[in-house]
Amino acid sequence: MNDLRELYQELIIDHSRSPRNHGKLPHSNLEARGHNPLCGDEIDMEVLRNDDGVLESIGFTATACAICTASASIMTETLKGKEEKIAREIFAEFHAKVTGEDSVSYPDELMKLEVFTGVKDYPSRVKCATLAWHTLIQALSGDSREASTE
């Protein structure tokens, strides 16, 4: 179990230090801003969704903790190229796991998300892990209000 915990920590550190899909998109048609008032994390999410509902590109900029940044990075890698409907289903599954509502293992293609299941034991860290996801859903919904974890 210690080896697995160390691997998870390494993955979070890697994605927080070198986040994937970090930066503004040159072309986007959806965007949202998220804020976690509990810890001060802030994130801007940009999405290019095509006419078929596929998330062609997802980018983010953030002033956030390691967990929030890593979650945004892994989320963008996971959801890029997926249909919006599938992205929303993955969000629901992710949210259920990090809040402790579901303990079934992820399918193989989503195993990277497993690194965040331990945050369920730390409610304030759940908000860090889910901020990017809530912000993405806000962007997909076309809601101009700031996404929040509260």
Image (tube, rainbow, N blue to C red):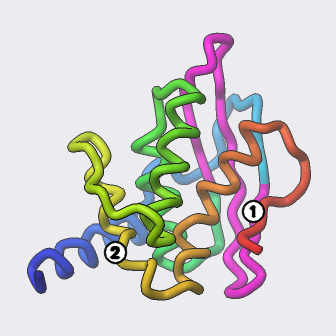
Q: State which quadrant residue 11 falls in.
A: bottom left
| Segment tinted magenta in the rendering | 33-60
Residue 15 locus on image (x, y percent): 38, 64
| Total numbered circles | 2
Residue occupying the point 47% across, 62% down: 71
Residue 10 locus on image (x, y percent): 24, 74
- Is 54 rendered above or below residue 77? above
Residue type indicated by callout 2: Ile
- Our reading of the magenta stretch's main secondary structure is strand
Element under label 1?
A: strand
Does 49 lie within the magenta span?
A: yes
Nearest the eye: 150 or 33: 150
Residue 146 locus on image (x, y percent): 85, 59
- Is 76 rendered above or below residue 101? above
The quarter of the rendered structure image containing the N terminus is bottom left
Q: Which residue is mark 1?
A: 34
The tag earlier along the polypeptide, 2 or 1, is 2
Q: Residue 150, labelled with which disc?
A: none
In the orientation shown, which residue stands out farthest toward the right? 145
Q: Which residue is mark 2?
A: 13
Is any atom of residue 58 visible in this view?
Answer: yes
